[in-house]
Image: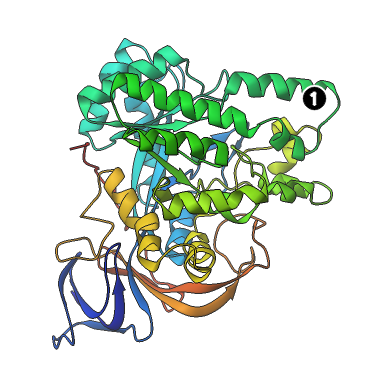
Amino acid sequence: MRTLIKNGTVVTATDTYKGDVLVEDEKVSTIGSSLDIAADKTIDASGKYVLPGGIDVHTHMDMPFGGSKSSDDFETGTRAAAFGGTTTIVDFAIQYRGQTLHHAMEAWAKKAEGKAVCDYGFHMIITELNDQVEGEMDALVRQGITSLKLFMAYTGVFMLDDASIFKALLRTGKNGGSICMHAENGGVIDVLVQRALAEGKTAPKYHALTRPARAEAEATHRAIALAEIADVPIYIVHLSAAEALEMVTEARDRGLPANAETCPQYLFLSYDNYEEPGFNGAKYVMSPPLREKAKQDQLWRGLAFNDLQVISTDHCPFCMKEQKELGLNDFSKIPNGAPGVETRMSLVYDGGVRAGRISLNRFVELTSTSPARIFGMFPRKGTIAPGSDADIVVFDPNRTVTLAAKTLHMNVDYNPYEGRRVTGATDTVLSRGRLVIEDGKFVGRAGAGSFVKRATRS
Ligand SMILES: [Zn+2]
C-alpha cells in the first residue's frame, strides 16, 4: 500500500519546507520535491501543513475515579484524539493497593485492545511500593512501560510518602525507567479541604481555593530535590502554577535533568471560570486547578524558552450529568478532570503559533517531537523522516472552527472551550500509514491501534 501526500509544507521540530511524502505500508519511505511515483492513494496537501501526528502523553481513558469512571473509553477517546490530530496517546494504568503491577498492566491492556483506533502506550501509576513491587518495576520497564507515575497528593488513594518516592527514583536509576510526578502537597490540601467544608464552603470554586499554587510549587521543588539526591531525571506532569515553573527553571539553570509538561487548560482557562454561575464551575474541577489569568504569560515564556518541554492534555472527561453532579453539595466529591484530547492541537496552534507566542516548529516540538523523545518513542514517532511510522496529520492553518461539545467527538456532555473560535484544524490523519480521518470524516477502525513498546533512557 502506497500513499503519496503531495504539495504540502512539511513541518518538523527543526524544518519547514515544501515537499511530497511517500508512505509505504506503515512507514514513511521517501521525502522529496515533486515526487513522480505511482501510488494507490494520493492526498493533495496544497496550502496545508504536513505534520508528524500529535502525541499526547497524558490521558485517562476508562479510568475509575471516586465511584465514577472517565466517560471516554479507548475507542471514543482515541477516535476523538485522531479527529484533533493526535495519533499516539500514553495513558495511565493504575496499580491499586494490594495489586501487582502485572495485574494492573493486564487490566489496562484489556481496556485498550480491540478498541484503540490509533497507537497507545502506558505509564504505570504506583500507589504502593514494597520490595516485590520494586522488583516488578524492572520487568515492566523491559516490557516497554518505561515510565512510572507517582503522586504527592490524594492521601489514602494514590499518595506515596517521600521514602517510597525516593526508593522508586533510585530504582529507575538502575533500570532505565523514569518517574513522572503529580506534584502537589497532599497533606496541606487535605487540611484546607476539611477546613473549607467545616465552614460550609461547598461550591466548586473551593476546589481551587484549597489547592494553592504554593502547594504545587513546594511539591515540585521537593520532587526535583529527591530526584537530584537519587541522581536521576524527573518529569513533572500537568504543571499549572507559575510558582512551580520557577522551581523547574531554577533546577534546569543548575543543569538538572528536570522536565515538565503543561496543558492547554492552564494556558487558555483561568480561576475566573470557577466563578461562573451555579454549578458551572464544576466543569473545570481538575487537579491541579486553573490558576490566575495574569500568570499565564509565564507559562508561555516557559514553553518558548524550553523550561516546559511538552504540552499534553490530562484528558479525563466526566459528564456534568450524573458524574460532576456527584459533588453538587460538596466540591471534594466532584470527579477531577476535563476533556481535552481533541482540542489540543487547534488550541495551541491558534493561541500559540498564530498569536506569535511560539514558532511553528516549536509547536510541533511541544506536541509531538519532545514527548516522543522524553518517553522513548523517537524517531519511530514524533517526526516525519524516512523509516519513521507514517503517523501524519494534514493540517489546514486557515480553517476556522468553533469548539462545541455538539460537534466535537469526545464522549462528554460539555466542553470547557464552548463557543471559542480557533483557526487551524486537522483535515486528514494517517496512523501507521492507514487513513483514520479523511477530510474531517472518520474512516478508521476500532482495534487498529497497537501498543507502543517504549525504549528506556539511553
Ligand atoms: Zn492525570
- Of the residues shown, which amino acid type is indicated by label 1? Leu
Mark 1 Cα within 10 Å, few/some/many (few <14, many 20+)? some
Residue 362, given in percent of the width and then of the height, sits at 37, 61
Q: Quadrant of the N terminus?
A: bottom left
Can you identify the residue that label 1 sits on? 197
In the current view of this chain or complex, which residue is farthest to the right?
A: 200
* Residue at the spot 35% in from the left edge and 33% down from the top edge: 254
Residue 244, given in percent of the width and then of the height, sits at 52, 36
* Residue at the spot 56% in from the left edge and 36% down from the top edge: 243
Closer-to-camera residue (253/406): 253
Is 389 drawn above or below residue 172 in the view shown?
Answer: below
Q: Quadrant of residue 340?
A: bottom right
Residue 436, given in percent of the width and then of the height, sits at 37, 68
Is 432 drawn above or below residue 104 in the view shown?
Answer: below
Residue 388, given in percent of the width and then of the height, sits at 19, 61
Q: Quadrant of residue 75?
A: bottom left
